[in-house]
Image (cartoon, grey):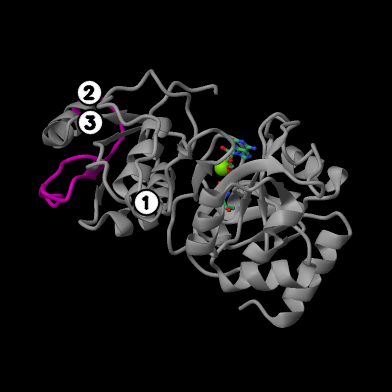
């Protein structure tokens, strides 16, 4: 259990330029004082992340918005009021408090208020903005438990606050509010439908084509095992074939199909509800790695609601490696 003194200790670590891993409702983050370039540099180093990839700055509440962003459009303000605290990051013009170290040199900044009591306690105790990417090595699967963080980053992180398993399970939705119209840069925990209902207009979303094969998306959020996406009806047959050909196959069996009879190394029965699937997704990928699978066969879920974020992560997991 995490106590009030752990929160104080974590806030003190942040003030001293150290790193703290903490839970959010989406995934665990690796936090540093967003106004301390040396601390932010340590985050990049611990993750093995290229310094040109910008970080999300986490805030204790929407009332800090205008300290961290400049010229916030009304539509973005409406989204912040509606969905914060929550799994939504807004990309805005950077305000005076934001160092270029945290934005990868960009004039824009991604901001979010996470909906997790420990994260909010930490942010309130610290008082400033906490720059935090997901607490994994660059390119690999985001951690959704404190144990995952320790596996990923080991001693590179000063303190890991344990808030149990993350409830959303995939990262925040990133909305770009710096252009003439809003667009979704990364689908995530707030659905496109919920955003559009509040805005009253449609949003542009990347990657909604029916791509079913690897090769078009740079690999990210990836397990060690190679991931292959096929049509739902083909999942079981493709998995069993690959197993016969000598692979150690892990399979994500879609809800409409019977997982019990599949003859491969490891089987995941995908939950019916997309929110449950999202919550479990990264844990399943880790589990199949742990079981020694070298190939994972899966299909894309329908791309509505949380299915959009799941499909996005699966496509990226199936993308060409080395990115
Ligand atoms: O759910 C989440 O958002 C988690 C938790 C810890 O809050 N954080 C997270 O951070 O997923 P990270 O660093 O793994 O992903 C941040 C994403 C990156 O894809 C980055 O390119 C994008 O946010 N991003 C950050 N600042 C940006 C900016 N100014 N313009 C465009 N994209 C930006
Ligand atoms: Mg990440």
Q: Measuring 76% from the left and 55% from the top, which residue is drawn there?
A: 67
- Residue 29, image x and y in percent? 62, 54
In the picture provided, is 136 more to the left or to the right than 5? left
- Residue 65, image x and y in percent? 68, 57
Q: Please name whichever residue, 281 or 197, is drawn nearer the observer in this view of the structure.
A: 197
Report helix, strand or loop for mark 2: loop
Mark 1 and mark 2 in contact? Answer it, CB < 8 Å.
Answer: no
Label 1 residue near ligand 1, CB within 8 Å: no
Residue 249 belongs to magenta span? yes
Is the N terminus in the top left, top right, bottom left or bottom right quadrant? Answer: bottom right
The magenta-colored residue range is 243-264
Report helix, strand or loop for mark 1: loop
Vertical relation: 172 (above or below) 163: above
Mark 3 or 1, nearer chain start: 1
Question: In the image, which disc is placed on residue 245?
Answer: 2
Mark 1 or 2, nearer chain start: 1
Camera-nearest label, 1 or 2: 1
Q: Which residue is mark 3?
A: 243
Q: Measuring 31% from the left and 54% from the top, which residue is drawn there?
A: 277
Camera-nearest label, 3 or 1: 1
Q: Please name whichever residue, 185 or 273, is drawn nearer the observer in this view of the structure.
A: 185
Q: Measuring 22% from the left and 39% from the top, which residue is drawn there?
A: 264
Please rate how many residues cluster around mark 2, counting C-alpha atoms within 10 Å: few if below 14, some from 14 to 19, many from 20: few
Report helix, strand or loop for mark 3: helix
Please rate how many residues cluster around mark 3, counting C-alpha atoms within 10 Å: few if below 14, some from 14 to 19, many from 20: some
Q: Which residue is mark 1?
A: 191
- Residue 183, image x and y in percent? 46, 37
Vertical relation: 20 (above or below) 126: above
Is the C terminus in the top left, top right, bottom left or bottom right quadrant? Answer: top right
């Amino acid at each position: 259990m995490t106590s009030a003194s752990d929160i104080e200790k974590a806030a003190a670590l942040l003030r001293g330029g150290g790193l703290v891993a903490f839970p959010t409702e989406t995934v665990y983050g690796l936090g540093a004082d967003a106004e301390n370039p040396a601390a932010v540099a340590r985050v990049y180093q611990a993750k093995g992340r290229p310094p040109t990839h910008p970080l999300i700055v986490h805030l204790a509440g929407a009332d800090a918005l205008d300290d961290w962003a400049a010229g916030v459009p009304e539509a973005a303000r409406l989204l912040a009021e509606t969905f914060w605290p929550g799994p939504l990051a807004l990309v805005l013009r950077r305000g005076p408090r934001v160092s270029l170290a945290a934005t990868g040199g960009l004039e824009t900044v991604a901001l979010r208020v996470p909906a997790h009591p420990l994260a909010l306690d930490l942010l309130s105790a610290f008082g400033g903005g906490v720059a935090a990417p997901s607490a994994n090595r660059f390119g690999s699967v985001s951690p959704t438990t404190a144990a995952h963080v320790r596996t990923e980053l080991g001693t590179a992180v000063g303190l890991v606050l344990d808030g149990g398993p993350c409830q959303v399970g995939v990262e925040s939705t990133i909305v770009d509010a710096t252009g003439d119209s809003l667009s979704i840069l990364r689908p995530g925990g707030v659905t496109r439908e919920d955003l559009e209902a509040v805005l009253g207009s449609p949003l542009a979303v990347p990657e909604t084509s029916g791509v079913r094969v690897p090769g078009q998306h740079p690999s990210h959020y990836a397990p060690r095992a190679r991931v292959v996406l096929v049509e739902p009806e083909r999942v079981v047959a493709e998995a069993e074939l690959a197993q016969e050909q000598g692979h150690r196959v892990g399979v994500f069996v879609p809800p409409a199909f019977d997982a019990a009879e599949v003859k491969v190394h490891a089987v995941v029965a995908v939950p019916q509800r997309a929110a449950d699937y999202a919550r479990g997704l990264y844990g399943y990928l880790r589990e199949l790695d742990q079981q020694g699978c070298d190939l994972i066969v899966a299909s894309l879920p329908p791309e509505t609601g949380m299915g959009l974020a799941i499909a996005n992560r699966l496509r990226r997991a199936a993308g060409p490696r080395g990115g």
